[in-house]
Amino acid sequence: MTAVPPPVLAIRDLRLAFRGAGGESEVLHGISLHVNAGEKVALVGESGSGKSVTARLAMGLLQGGRGVRVSGSILFTGIEIAGGGPEIARLRGTRVTMIFQDPTSALNPTFTIRDQFRRVLRSHNADLGAREADAIAEAGLADTQIDNPRRVLDSYAFQLSGGMNQRVMIAMALVSRPALLIADEPGTALDVTVQAATLKLMHDLTEKTGTAVLLISHNLGVVREFSDRVYVIYRGSMVEHGTTGQLFRDPRHPYTRALLSAVPRIIGGGLPRIPERSPEFASPLVVHPGCGEPGERRAA
Amino acid sequence: MSAILEVERLGRTFVAGAHTVRALDDITLSIERGECHAIVGESGSGKTTLGNIILGIHAPSDGRLNFNGIPLPDRRPRALRRAIQLVQQNPLSALNPRRSVGASVRLPIDVHELRPRAERNARVVELLREVDLDPRFARRPPRGLSGGERQRIAIARALAAEPELIVLDEPTSALDVLVQARVLDLLGRLRREHGLTYIFITHDLAVVRAIADRVSVFQRGRLVETGTVAEIFAAPRSAYTRELIGAIPVVTEEEARLRDQIRPPATTASAA
């Protein structure tokens, strides 16, 4: 038997609660997920499902905040980051990177794209000269099919189109060849044709760099085309986990089935009447054969 | 069928300093009474400008509009403002935060003096029931309501004016897919029950397939294609329509096959 390399990201029994004036409210109720090296995994859910806070915890961005209580384990490349700390702060932006829904507001409006690239590259390697940094940035932008990388480097985000900024974000997120890219609803703020192009580009470039992706989305259509494996999350609990093929061919959980049937079909047929809420949606997690968490035994 | 709205050679130019932008150019189309007519396009297509001209928010630079066969003036008399209503994408910004839901829904009834004063509160209750909301919502402020609830209230408020035509500007784009399905279902039911006509502005052709009768595709201020929804999906004539259909993320093999037949070769990468 060959040794299986550990996952890039392994979340286990993760709970998250916020303490406020009205007491404590738990928003993640013990979720587990993992992403293997080079793999594309999707986390699908509607607003309020906990998908975006999961992404922020995996980036170490929520830990230590006022009134935030985290329990369970988040292993990033074998390092425990559930409690936050200096390690994840050092890895963030180089070993684990993130791209967002609206690229134009995610980029800093007061620095040129060139300055922002230099900062990213120097946080990775402090000795890097300006000329070397620019050459790497230029090559990275060229990889995203930007025709005139020099002009883009001299621009500010507000001078570029949404689609162009999305390419810049992708290039910046991959320039350090991270182990994991977290993409939170990438391109949903953009036009449909630009969004489709963005996802294709992100897919192809992460294949090239061998970067694993955790795609956060509410859109099952996007997930079907992008990812190898899918987790469906509903109100802070995982409800279904399978390969993309398994989940779309044979959705088992009532919530997954409702989500799928609610997507308007381009072959027509209108929309079925489905409830927005149902006690059935709270039924236990369904794991498809061969898809358990590492170390957990499931029948193949 | 008879046309409720005819758009004839409509154009709109915006001037900002030295720049002029032709937001709409030479648009001719007809909206039939009782249909759901989708206006589809991406940002900069002019679809929202067209909606604003129909609502009387902007005046056209050239061309004209006929409503029930009569030219629509730029300054709309009250009766015409009542007959054409709007439901917007973001219902939170569309509802006055300081006013209760009931007061928001009642406002058009008061403004247009649609019912005897003594019956108006009962009418608000009836409207909330029509959009599947508990009448107790009337006393609540819009804050704290879900996106789906706020959109139902915006629909109830549009219905309160007893319109003939409703312009729906991306009414479900900000909603989760399960909530979207319910709101689309509600809109379909209300159209049948009240004999309403919809102009449904959207970027989402899959939604168009689910609820519209006819569709007009806009690109950079021009109408590139118009036809029944079935025709457009069976045989789109323009390359841009093919590109839009080709970009729809789908959830079944059957749809993927249809889409890949329609998708023009190697255009999505150059689209941005």
Image: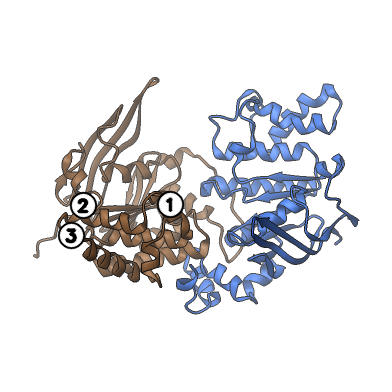
Chain colours: A brown, B blue
Q: Give the residue at the far right of this rendering.
A: B70
Q: Secondary structure at mark 1?
A: loop
Q: Which residue is mark 1?
A: A101
The amino acid sitting under disc 1 is: Gln
Q: Residues within 10 Å of mark 3 (few under 14, many from 20)?
A: some
Q: Position of residue A111 (x, y in %)?
A: 36, 52
**Which of B115 and B54 lies nearest the eye of the viewer?**
B54
- Per the model, the C-alpha gap separating discs 3 and 2 is 9 Å
Q: Residues within 10 Å of mark 2 (few under 14, many from 20)?
A: some
Residue depicted at x 51% and y 47%: B176
**Which of B76 and A236 lies nearest the eye of the viewer?**
B76
Q: Is residue B119 left or right of residue A249?
A: right
The amino acid sitting under disc 2 is: Ser
Q: Which residue is mark 3?
A: A128
Residue A123, label in figure: 2
Q: Position of residue A106 (x, y in %)?
A: 39, 49
Q: Position of residue A230 (x, y in %)?
A: 35, 55
